[in-house]
Amino acid sequence: MQSIRELYKIGKGPSSSHTMGPERAARHFLGKYPSAARYRATLFGSLALTGKGHLTDEAIAGVFEGRRLDIIFDCAPRTLPHPNTMEMCAFDEDGNTLGSITYLSVGGGTVRIAGEPPMQAEDVYPFRNFQEIMDYCRSKNVPLDQAVYDFEDDGIKDFLRQIWRSMQATIRRGLTASGKLPGTLGVERKAKRLFETTEEEEEPEQREKRHLCAFAFATSEENAGGGQVVTAPTCGASGVLPAVLLYMSRRHGFSENRILAALAVAGLVGVTVKQNASVSGAEAGCQAEIGTATSMAAAAVSRLFEATIDETEYAAEIALEHQLGLTCDPICGYVQIPCIERNAVAAMRALESAELSRVLAGTRKISFDLIVQTMYETGKDISARYRETSEGGLAAAYKVS
């Protein structure tokens, strides 16, 4: 399995697969052909169908600023190596092709070249699935986060600390922002209102849940506005884990080291899904993005409360099992409706999953690895209309006035 550094990435929204990935691919290609007279980027599949709403063209153009660049949105149905496929070509002054590379944006900002091994870091964990992670930790009689500290480099705690501080900074910005998000939908920012609203007969528990949702809205709205977020595991699902961690930190006063341990365990859940399935909405629907984020957050809560390994795995399993089949149908290709609200709902579900697992872990029948496999198979069966193409579901039913 790859490092959790490949899971948690700090970057600009609104989409890790549609903006961060293509931007990374563009930088790689420019490095290969820095002196070309002209460049062309052709977007296929989900990148073409929802690229405008996801600001894909702006992300690519920003890399080639001051150079001749053509961007083509090829929406024609075709067989692709991945739903997020992008071809880049370089030309000389006479129009001769200097070279071309086909990139696959496979989710979470990770990019691969078609037909080649992953471009990113090599595997750092000797595990193939979550069962092997648990077996290792049981053999050492250590909590799950110790696997991270055993196999990652010496700077991993500093890295997690940077990730946590970036998450908090995003929430702070989102809680103070107001106005409408970019695009034609006219979606208003709601995080500030959610956080500051007071009601006379509101119970303390209701207020706490409202704050949890406000934190999720804050990050998701920052992402939708192109602000800086942390992929957890993606930009579209980036609001769940930070909201849950900040909520738990404020409510229970957990130390920073405990939060970092929770982030580490959540990271193990995320890389397990990336290794054995997908975190790409274009490949497996929103179950791959929000479903994985909910599992990560549920496992993080379990670690905060020092739950057993079995309880932690069960929390992650519950969270993903009950989002199987969740579709990705962003209206007009914007990461706004239903994405922002969905992050808040998922944050609440993560807490509920962790609570259920503490009571029922000894009765369970289904493993997390089995649910990950099931999620991936379900994702492959979901019609492309419901996998980040904006051709079905809410995206097709809602008519923009």
Image: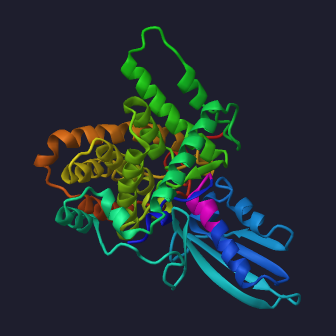
Number of marks in picture: 0
164 vs 376: above or below = above
91 vs 324: above or below = below
339 vs 81: above or below = above
Q: Residue furthest top?
A: 200
**Residue at the image position 68 percent from the left and 56 percent from the top:** 55
Q: Residue furthest left?
A: 363
* Residue 237 included in the magenta stretch of the image: no
Q: Quadrant of the N terminus?
A: bottom left
* Residue 14 included in the magenta stretch of the image: yes
**Residue at the image position 57 percent from the left and 39 percent from the top:** 171
Q: Position of residue 391 (x, y in %)?
A: 55, 55
**Viewer can see residue 387:** no
**Residue at the image position 69 percent from the left and 72 percent from the top:** 26
Q: Position of residue 108 (x, y in %)?
A: 51, 61
28 vs 148: above or below = below
Q: Position of residue 29 (x, y in %)?
A: 69, 79
Q: Position of residue 374 (x, y in %)?
A: 29, 62
| 222 displayed left or right of 377 | right
Image quadrant in which you'd find residue 245: top left
| 92 displayed left or right of 200 | right
Q: Nearer the viewer, residue 378 or 197?
A: 197
| 210 displayed left or right of 336 | left
| 69 displayed left or right of 338 | right
- The range drawn in magenta is 13-22
**Residue at the image position 23 percent from the left and 50 percent from the top:** 314
Q: Nearer the viewer, residue 266 or 322?
A: 266
Q: Quadrant of the C terminus?
A: top right
